[in-house]
Image (cartoon, grey):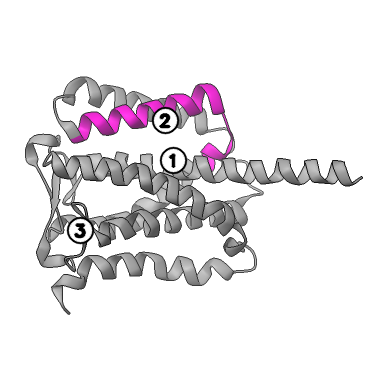
């Protein structure tokens, strides 16, 4: 295999099965693309700005041995694809869990406790490791999102979000494990805590949680907006 295709193939592999299974009758994920793609694009734009900044600040970089060599700014196209394929796959997992376990109430009321738990984790890491740029910025952004969801939004879909996040750790260990072990992505050791799962910095798990939380928050907002518009049209036509 051509080494330059590695990151590209990881992206395609991440997308392949969720895309094929999007037409499963029970999940019917393709019917929700109207809400999904705007959510991915908005979140992706935010994370690409973050990515560009961290690349300029030498927080991380990309090994040219494993990428095709096409860039937008300092960001390889494979990294741009990452912000499409990973959210797509994770929200597919989220919708599958809801579709197949929706009769279960197990996770419905757990979101407050999980939110407080992760808020405590990010606050602790921020206190002890705020001098590391990747750790500090990730913890600040995730803490703000968690606080907003806990205090302002308070939606029960957050329980399903946490369930989906924990399930998504399994494929993350495979994909990010390859990205960090080769390495495709090279981290500045001065900007991370140094704690790792396999070769994956702990910060990556919080980063992916932030990515997924923002995407699902927008995704659910677009769905609620469409539902309200539908109800409004029904009232006007009746």
Q: Secondary structure at mark 1?
A: helix
Query: In which quadrant of the rendered view does residue 201 lie?
Result: top left
Q: Is residue 105 left or right of residue 135?
A: right
Residue 66 position within the rendered picture, expressed as x and y whole percent measured from the top left:
15, 66
**Which mark, residue 179?**
3
- Note whether 231 is above or below 62 in the view shown: above
| Mark 2 element type | helix
User: In this rendering, would 94 be left or right of 105?
Assistant: left
Name the secondary structure under disc 3: helix
Of residue 177 and residue 68, the one placed in the foreground of this image is 68
**Magenta span covers which residues?**
134-160
Query: Which residue bears the numbered disc 2?
Result: 145
Marks 2,1: beta carbons within 8 A: yes
Question: Image quadrant for the C terminus?
Answer: top right
85 relative to 173 in the view: left or right: right
The label on residue 213 is 1
- State the predominant SS element of the stretch in magenta: helix
Residue 98 percent location from the top left of the image: 59, 51
């Amino acid at each position: 295999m051509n080494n330059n295709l590695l990151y590209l193939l990881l992206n395609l592999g991440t997308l392949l099965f969720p895309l094929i299974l999007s037409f499963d009758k029970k999940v019917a994920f393709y019917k929700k693309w109207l809400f999904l793609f705007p959510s991915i694009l908005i979140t992706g734009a935010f994370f690409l700005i973050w990515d560009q900044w961290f690349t300029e600040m030498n927080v991380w970089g990309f090994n040219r041995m494993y990428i095709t060599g096409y860039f937008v700014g300092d960001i390889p196209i494979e990294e741009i694809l990452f912000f499409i394929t990973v959210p797509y796959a994770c929200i597919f997992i989220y919708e599958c869990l809801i579709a197949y376990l929706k009769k279960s109430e197990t996770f419905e009321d757990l979101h407050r406790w999980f939110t407080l738990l992760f808020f405590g984790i990010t606050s602790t890491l921020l206190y002890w490791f705020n001098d590391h740029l990747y750790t500090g910025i990730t913890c600040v952004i995730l803490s703000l999102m968690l606080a907003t969801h806990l205090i302002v939004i308070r939606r029960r879909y957050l329980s399903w979000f946490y369930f989906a996040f924990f399930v998504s750790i399994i494929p993350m260990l495979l994909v990010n494990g390859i990205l960090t072990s080769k390495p495709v992505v090279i981290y500045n050791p001065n900007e991370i805590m140094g704690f790792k799962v396999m070769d994956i910095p702990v910060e990556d798990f919080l980063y992916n949680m932030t990515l997924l939380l923002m995407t699902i928050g927008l995704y659910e907002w677009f769905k609620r907006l469409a539902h309200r518009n539908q109800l409004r049209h029904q009232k006007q036509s009746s």
